[in-house]
Image: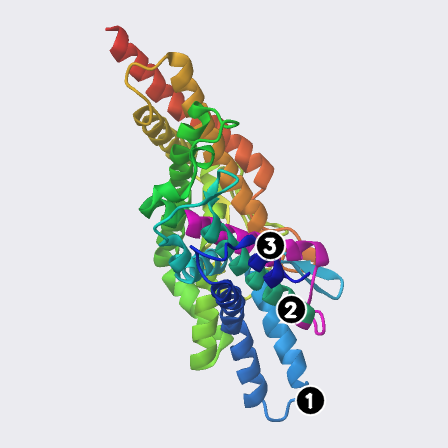
Amino acid sequence: MTVMELLRRATPTSGGPDPRAYQRTLLEGAGAAAASALVFVLPALLVWVAASESTVPWTTSLGVGASLWLLGTGAHLALGGAVVTVVPLLFLALAVLGAAWAAVRAVRESAEDRTVVLLAGLLHRPLALALGAWTFGYAVVAALWAVVASLAEPRPVLWTLVFPVLVVPVGAALLALVHLLRRRPELAGERLRRPAWLPEAVRRGLRPGVEGAAALLGAGVLICVGFVVLHLGNVTNLQAALAPGVIGGVVLSLAQLLVLPNLALWAVSFVAGTGFSAVEGASATWTGSRTSLLPMVPVFGALPEPGAFPGWLPVVVLLPVAVGAFVGWRALRSVARLSTERTKLTVAGVAVVVAAGLVGLLDVVGGASLGQDRLSSIGAPAGAMTLALLVELLAGAGLVLGWDRWKLRR
């Protein structure tokens, strides 16, 4: 039985979108995946066309472009004996947001039905079926791109394909659903809006936690941009030494921009006290910076000069503590002023765990390998950074909770 037959059986014969609308939605999901992949596939084919003396078949260029797209959406690539796991987080975010925008456009007709018919008491039936069709269409085309990528080097690592094939379309569909439910909350049943298995205090702590993770990442981005500006001469000298040309320079700059959130996580790990490593033998912690032979990546020119850092530098830990205070303040604003201390502690604790956990998860997704030997382990230690952030955020949130308790007892 095909997917479209299932959709026809699940769709009422009257009072709802025509089954052909689901076919269009499925095709729009497939088109969203195809359009996203063309960001890498088209340049790869253009390079093959421009290289008139190349002996590489066009199918190889097609596979390379598909592999790069899969890397950008979360998969890992195997090249010889090395595995590349560094995922450009900015492209991943743009891919998910772009897919969510496409999903909203694809299912808008289903979300505008005047008569709301809930599926299992959870979600408007036509909307649920439309989102399912869109997700299926995206996943099928992503899987086809994975087959194309497997025909050339580098090849995607099989188990990591779950990210571009499943996690990205499902995540995009969920973001689209959240957007649509904000406009029409009645499309969701009470069981979906307020799930019984999720305590109220936990639900209230989710948003402050996400805001805290965003604040940490934003601070990391500002630190990275600041170091690039301070060491702009070194960065431009490295760029000039590579002599990439106009087009190559644009491509190189865009590639570095796409990994800016990855580098921001390095900065967050530094201020948290766990440091980071650019390559094996080149690292930076509160005590100082060590150098080694670095790859010719222009942005690495912004790394701190080798040597010992001033003894006062650990004061930078106040940054995550301040973010923890912000998380605690946002957690308190999400509950009633006279709520019990237990409720406030629970909400703030959940928010802190979510903030630290999200940053650690981003670091895991962002990967830590650009190849083998000295490039096999780079970036921030996800586990140690998460634990350090957890302690520091708790300290900041605890100060705010203590201040709140003191004011109430005056």
Residue located beneath label 2 in the image: 144
Q: Nearer the viewer, residue 337 or 89?
A: 337
> Is tag 2's residue or tag 1's residue first in the polypeptide sequence?
1
Q: Main secondary structure of the magenta part?
A: helix
State the separation of the CA atoms marked 3 and 2.
13 Å
Q: Nearer the viewer, residue 363 or 16?
A: 16
Which residue lies at the image location 65% right of the left edge and 74% below the top edge? 63
| Residue 186 sits in quarter | top left
Q: Counting other residues with Cα less than 10 Å from the Cα at mark 3, is it few (<14), some (14-19), or many (20 or more)?
A: some
What residue occupies the far bottom of the structure in this picture? 52
Q: Nearer the viewer, mark 3 or mark 1?
A: 3
Indicate yes or no whether the magenta region holds residue 117: no
The range drawn in magenta is 148-177
Dividing the image into 4 quarters, which one contains the N terminus?
Answer: bottom right
> What amino acid does circle 1 point to?
Thr
Residue located beneath label 3 in the image: 166
> What amino acid does circle 2 point to?
Leu
> Where's residue 313, x and y in %?
41, 36
User: In the displayed structure, does residue 140 sit left or right of residue 20?
Assistant: right
> Where's residue 333, x and y in %?
30, 26
| Disc 3 to disc 2: CB gap under 8 Å | no
What residue occupies the far top of the structure in this picture? 410
Q: Nearer the viewer, residue 182 or 393?
A: 182
Residue located beneath label 1 in the image: 55
State the separation of the CA atoms marked 3 and 1.
35 Å
What residue occupies the far front of the structure in this picture? 14
Q: Nearer the viewer, mark 2 or mark 1?
A: 2
Q: Counting other residues with Cα less than 10 Å from the Cα at mark 2, is it few (<14), some (14-19), or many (20 or more)?
A: some
> Where's residue 182, x and y in %?
34, 45
